[in-house]
Amino acid sequence: MKNVFNNKILKRVGVYPGSFDPITYGHQDIIKRASYIVDHLVVAVAKNADKSQLFTLEDRVNMVRRDIEIIDIDSNAKVEVNSFDTLLMHYVEICDASVIIRGLRAVSDFEYEFQMAGMNVKMNPKVETLFLMASEQCQFISSRFVKEICNLGGDVSSFVSKFVQNELNKAFMKKTL
Ligand code: ADP
């Protein structure tokens, strides 16, 4: 299957999977940088039934789509946002992708990412996992802490977009009603 965008044949498709519960400036930074590496980036929001999420799948996809509009992505790249509810490697094959993009923060991310990349390459050796080191200003940003801070009334404007801040406030208001 050939990937065509604006009548141009796209060569390299990358999938950036994650929970994005919610998308942060750290995720935004990875999306922006990945857009300069691949021709077509699929930001793939995982349903992750086993993880308890604050936001529904639909809301998480919507927040990523809204944030994409304010990211300075490579104008030559196509970036799309989808959701998936299957094994990641199956989804990667459906997308005809050759690269999985992941972000790496401190040492704590390493063990999990190392194992996941190892299992995935066993399932399909043609697909590489590419790790982008978190930018200095994003090293400490995590969706989990953003939720905790917001829930306790803290200011999360340095970590997430205005749109996501509003969604967080609404979600926590709903929870306390
Ligand atoms: P998952 O549940 O798959 O870990 P996340 O949404 O938490 O989903 O993260 C998706 C990817 O983005 C992971 O590779 C994670 O390490 C990376 N990531 C999350 N936050 C940051 C950040 N602040 N800087 C760089 N990468 C990040």
Image (tube, rainbow, N blue to C red):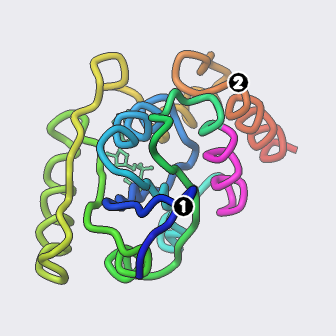
Secondary structure, magenta segment, majority class: helix
Q: Is residue 100 above or below residue 131?
A: below
Residue at numbered disc 2:
162
Give how far apart the Cα atoms at labels 1 and 2 are. Answer: 35 Å
What amino acid does circle 1 point to?
Answer: Asn
Residue depicted at x 34% and y 38%: 36
Residue depicted at x 29% and y 43%: 37
Q: Magenta region: which residues? A: 55-66
What amino acid does circle 2 point to?
Answer: Lys
Dot 2: what SS?
helix
Q: Residues within 10 Å of mark 2 (few under 14, many from 20)?
A: few
Q: Residues within 10 Å of mark 1 (few under 14, many from 20)?
A: few
Question: Going by the image, does 89 lie left or right of 76?
Answer: left
Residue depicted at x 65% and y 35%: 69
Q: Is residue 156 above or below residue 80?
A: above
Q: Residue furthest right?
A: 177
Q: Quadrant of ligand 1?
A: top left
- In the foreground, 64 or 106: 64
Dot 1: what SS?
loop
Q: Position of residue 14 (x, y in %)?
A: 35, 58
- Specify the quadrant of the image occupied by residue 148: top right
Residue at numbered disc 1:
7
Question: Going by the image, does 49 lie left or right of 61?
Answer: left
Q: Position of residue 21 (x, y in %)?
A: 56, 49
Q: Position of residue 79 (x, y in %)?
A: 52, 50
- Which is more foreground, mark 1 or mark 2? 1
Q: Position of residue 176 (x, y in %)?
A: 81, 42
Residue depicted at x 77% and y 31%: 166
Cβ of mark 1 under 8 Å from ligand 1: the answer is no
Query: Is residue 14 highlighted in magenta?
Result: no
Q: Are marks 1 and 2 in contact (CB under 8 Å)?
A: no
